[in-house]
Image (cartoon, grey):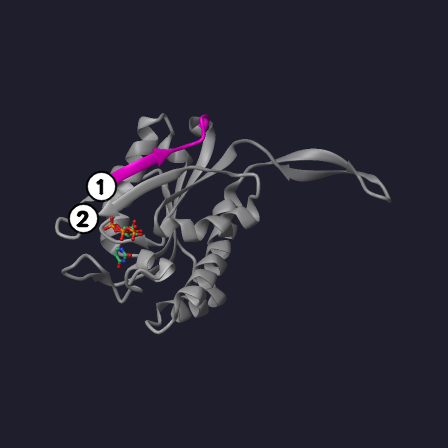
């Protein structure tokens, strides 16, 4: 059964407060998104399985642990998810990266998929979807649906975001209770335009300076 993990480490809370500030420019926004993602990635990778291996130190031969099992794929939801890729790659440098192109129709708030490209062996991988914002949950749900259609087991999918709304969390959990959700903040609600309150505004625009 998947869980909601709110990563409330003091450094994460501090950096999230800096990130929310409307006067922070794109450079600072990008840097903080990257830094916070490393903290989230640290928690996501906590459940990676270990195996015992033998290693010879300068002093003795010893049995120690190394990561084994499924390989990792990172799946950013474009555009804003791109800002989180390097943070996970810092921790799992050998991960492959697949891209999910999606935007939210501003009127209907329905996601539209325009691109989907994954590594060939995606069904054999632990897939970490990254997107800074989980608002209605429509984009996250469509991304998970697309992966499941390609035979990825929902139990092997993690969804990682910076800010989430209760509505989005419920959307994922209702259909995919197996998916673990990692978020740096669980905010109060959505406003009438589908923006998270208090949130941080439009993550893609702030990241890429297209405001
Ligand atoms: C934002 C965000 C998510 C989506 C969340 O992307 O990065 O993908 O909205 O909203 P939802 O949970 O209601 O679906 P946006 O559509 O603004 O595209 P962009 O990243 O290209 O700016
Ligand atoms: N997408 C964003 O970028 N921000 C929100 O608050 C909601 C959806």
Say which label, 2 or 1, has the lower sequence index.
2
Q: Is residue 194 above or below residue 173?
A: below
Q: Nearer the viewer, residue 66 or 108?
A: 108
Part of the protein shown in magenta:
113-121
Q: Residues within 10 Å of mark 2 (few under 14, many from 20)?
A: few
The image quadrant that residue 211 belongs to is bottom left
Q: Quadrant of the N terminus?
A: top left
Residue 31 numbered mark, or none: none
- Image coords of residue 12 (percent x, y): 46, 64
- Image coords of residue 14 (percent x, y): 44, 70
- Image coords of residue 172 (percent x, y): 28, 43
Residue 108 appears left or right of 135 = left
Contact between labelled residues 1 and 2, with CB atoms less than 8 Å apart: yes
Q: How many marks?
A: 2
Gap in Å between the C-alphas at discs 2 and 1? 7 Å
Instruction: Pick out the residue farthest to the front.
Output: 210
- In this rendering, does residue 174 appear at all? yes
- In this rendering, does residue 1 appear at all? no
Residue under label 1, please give it.
112
Q: Nearer the viewer, residue 205 or 160?
A: 205
User: Residue at horizontal 47%, vertical 31%?
Assistant: 125
User: Residue at horizontal 36%, vertical 25%?
Assistant: 151
User: Residue at horizontal 22%, vertical 59%?
Assistant: 195
Q: Is residue 18 above or below residue 113?
A: below
Element assignment for label 1: strand
User: Residue at horizontal 43%, vertical 29%?
Assistant: 122
Element assignment for label 2: loop
The image quadrant that residue 29 belongs to is bottom left
- Image coords of residue 106 (percent x, y): 17, 52
Q: Nearer the viewer, residue 185 or 85?
A: 85
Residue under label 2, please give it.
105
């Amino acid at each position: 059964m998947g869980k909601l993990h709110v990563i409330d480490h003091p450094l994460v809370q501090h950096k999230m407060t800096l990130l929310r500030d409307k006067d922070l420019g794109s450079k600072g926004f990008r840097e903080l998104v990257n830094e916070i993602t490393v903290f989230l990635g640290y928690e996501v990778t906590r459940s990676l399985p270990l195996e015992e291996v033998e290693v010879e130190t300068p002093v003795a031969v010893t049995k120690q642990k190394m990561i084994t099992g499924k390989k990792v794929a990172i799946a950013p939801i474009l555009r804003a998810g791109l800002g989180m890729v390097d943070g996970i790659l810092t921790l799992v440098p050998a991960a492959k990266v697949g891209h999910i192109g999606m935007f939210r129709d501003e009127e209907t708030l329905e996601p539209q998929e325009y691109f989907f490209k994954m590594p060939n062996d995606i069904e054999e991988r632990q897939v970490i979807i990254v997107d800074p914002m989980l608002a209605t949950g429509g984009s996250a749900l469509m991304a998970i649906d697309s992966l499941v259609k390609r035979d990825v087991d929902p139990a092997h999918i993690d969804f990682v975001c910076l800010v989430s709304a209760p509505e989005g969390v419920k959307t994922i959990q209702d259909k995919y209770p197996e998916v673990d959700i990692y978020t740096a903040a669980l905010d109060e609600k959505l406003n009438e335009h589908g923006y998270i309150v208090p949130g941080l505004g439009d993550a893609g625009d702030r990241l890429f300076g297209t405001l």
